Image (spheres, rainbow, N blue to C red):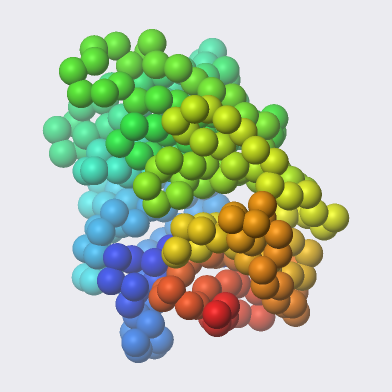
Amino acid sequence: EDLHLEWLPSNRQLLIVQPTSAVVLQTTSPFDTVSFTSTPETLWHVVSGTEILSSTGTTISKHNPITGGVERVYTSEAEIISMQESQGKVFVIQKGESQATISVIDYKTDESVVINTLPLSVAYELLEVTPSHITIANHNLQKIYLLSLPLQGQSNPLTQEIITLDANHALFNEDRSQLVLYSDFELKLFNIEDSTLKLLNRFSTRITDVAWYSDQKHIIISHGEKLVVADLSTNAETSQSIALLHDVTLSDFSLRTEEHILYATPDGLYTLRIK
């Protein structure tokens, strides 16, 4: 059964999303939970320790992970197919009649502004929103779109450049200067400042997940039944390989501490010490 896992800022609460329910688990007291109704189409995103957003169809709702309260906060004119929150605003991709639109919503003032457009598809996923960029995946085409956001004072966001990269997924490092990209078997590194792309490694088994490690000098890769900790200073040669019991899809490599990683298997949730 598919799981989506996301830590709340305190690292003491974990949002666990299943096809028909979303549960906030208190890790210090595993039997103390708060539950919300979900559907396979519902999108979830943690905003803060007291606010979780969800969207279903055209509706965005706010959930309190402490009290269990739910409040509808915004209704869109078009179906929302992906959502991310950043700095108090919600970035969405909406399915239009002839194209997909990327918009930013301020649900507190009920305002919406179109940032840019993409060819019509329902396979888009908003990966990350930073103060200067948005990354979007098209899973059908195996493309990553890197969209520059307008700087303060710039008036027309629709003139901003979109860079297209061949990959399934992308993840910024902590200072947003580099973007790690991976496809089924390849791992690449894109430098934001000079737009250079470097092949880091090819693998014989399919890559299922990738994340930056907390020191920003290593990348963690799940492929086959292994975890690989790759050292960027040695051109991503393997510095540590850990055998797993399953070909797992890791929970976005949710790092609870600098030395542990959380992952999900068909049997349950596990933490793994990687130092």
Residue 40: x percent and y percent? 55, 52
> Which image quadrant: the N terminus?
bottom right
> Which image quadrant: the C terminus?
bottom right
Residue 245: x percent and y percent? 75, 79
Q: Residue furthest front?
A: 234
* Left or right of 51 in this view: 94: right
Q: Residue at x 44, y 22 (%)?
A: 101
Front residue of 45/217: it is: 217
Q: Residue at x 67, y 68 (%)?
A: 239
Q: Residue at x 53, y 27 (%)?
A: 195
Res 242 → quadrant: bottom right
* Left or right of 257 in this view: 99: right
* Left or right of 241 in this view: 264: left
Front residue of 57/141: it is: 141
Res 238 → quadrant: bottom right
Compared with 137, 34 (above or below) is: below
Q: Residue furthest left?
A: 109
- Report the label total: 0
Residue 53 visible to the viewer: yes
Residue 9: x percent and y percent? 29, 65
Q: Residue at x 24, y 43 (%)?
A: 87
Residue 90 visible to the viewer: no
Residue 184: x percent and y percent? 75, 47
Front residue of 88/275: it is: 275
Compared with 211, 26 (above or below) is: below
